[in-house]
Image (spheres, grey):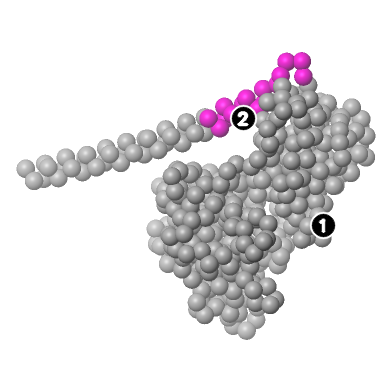
Amino acid sequence: MTADVSRWLWTAVTVALWLGLVGLTVWRVRAAARRAAEQGRALAPAAGEDTVLIAFASQTGFGEELAWMTARALGDGGVGARPLSFSDLNLETLKGARRLLVIASTTGEGDAPDGAARFVRQAMKTEVDLSHLSYGLLALGDRSYDAFCSFGHAVGDWLDACGAQTLFDRVEVDDGDAGAIRHWQHQLNQITGSTTAPDWTPPAYDRWRLVERRLLNAGSPGGEAWHLAFEPIDHAPDWAAGDIAEVGLPVRDGEPSASREYSVASLPSDGRVEFCIRLMTYPDGKPGLASGWLTQDLEVGGETAMRVRANRGFHAPPPEAPIILIGNGTGIAGLRGHLKARAQHDKTGGAWLLFGERTQAHDALYDADLQACLATGVLTRLDRSFSRDGGENRYVQSLVAEHARTVADWVDRGAYVYVCGSLEGMSKGVHAALEAALGEERLTRLTDAGRYRRDVY
């Protein structure tokens, strides 16, 4: 009798878990359907109007978000719109368009987003007749870099050389400046003829509560790296591995409102959003505006404003495909999210992590998690380098070079390569090491196929 009761209890628990999984799946499917329906309405061309092509080149998802906001604004004004990523853009599409809006991000020191590399190489190296085309340009950048909005200007210069006519002067956006984005909306109103369009504001932040903060690298010769976890308040967020959180900072000491972006190190199934954040300091020792507040000033139990934004360019590959994860420092956050995503599948193509930090004694970030991933098979292989150990500096790109043949073998088996961490030094060094291991042409083909992806900062 006891055994029968036990079996019934286990059966009931199993059914309850299954129903919960079904309910979660239905909710996510319906949410995706709502998003698709909303996008479909934005795409539907209005009668008697020529559809406006909206070409976007986005590295972290912000440019893509603006493209869909632009499409909705045009649709609300009765003008058909067709958003299209630069990764899917070609000369034939441009030749068939009459009006074009370009939203172009610049990444690194004047580089094009990874998804635009093929178009730059194949289309922008040629001069074609686009005299039939009128265009407007929204260039996204950051004035702290010398090559401000460089890629956006390169696209505009190429369109000019091909004979395209400008609809209005180029609009430059410095680090998400709201004033410049409002100016873009004004130009959209000129296209639609609207005079009563509401103010174009970004999606509202949600409320989150800090529930955990712990130092990950006590005694490290480098800056402090902190693990932070936030739980949602009165909302049920959904996101995917590779997505980015935008944290709104409180206004302090008369400084203007600001926000910072961080790679997410957790999944919705964890019930919270987690980060690995480095405490940055100025030369005078003053802590960074965002990292100082998050790692020192915000009390556990305190609230912050935040929204999680899709970063499709860094979303996970199919679970059956092998994945090579490469990063350094707090870049472990974005890679950790992908390992968590892999852990949700019974069978995967294998995962290999190559990671670099300063010292093994103090900077083996999330070592317990990684060892557990090895033990369960979520992580097939782990190689780490520590630049301050052993005298000679040794960085993660050295691991790529050392295991170049194995890297090539994984790629032969269909592996995707994901890089997360610092732009200067690591990202460029890893890129050069991958070129040496695979060849420049092959690495280019990986980029074009979406099998080489980067989230670097």
375 left or right of 448? left
Question: Residue flagged by tag 2: what amino acid is it?
Answer: Gln
Q: Can the viewer see residue 76 in this picture?
A: yes
The residue carrying mark 1 is 147
Disc 2 element = helix
Query: Relative to residue 188, is residue 409 depicted above or below?
Result: below
* Mark 2, other Cα within 10 Å: few <14 / some 14–19 / many ≥20: some
Query: Relative to residue 62, is residue 286 depicted above or below?
Result: below
Name which residue lies at 42% across and 33% down.
26
Question: Residue flagged by tag 1: what amino acid is it?
Answer: Ala
Q: Give the Cα separation between the discs numbered 1 and 2.
A: 33 Å
Name which residue lies at 65% across and 45% down.
61
Residue 187 location in percent, x, y?
A: 80, 34
Q: Residue furthest bottom?
A: 391
Residue 31 location in percent, x, y?
A: 49, 34
Disc 1 element = loop
Give the dominant element type of the magenta stretch: helix, strand or loop.
Answer: helix
Name which residue lies at 77% across and 35% down.
186
Magenta segment includes 39? yes
Residue 119 location in percent, x, y?
A: 78, 42
Q: Residue furthest front?
A: 254
The residue carrying mark 2 is 39
Magenta segment includes 280? no
77 left or right of 345? right
Residue 128 location in percent, x, y?
A: 90, 35
429 left or right of 33? right
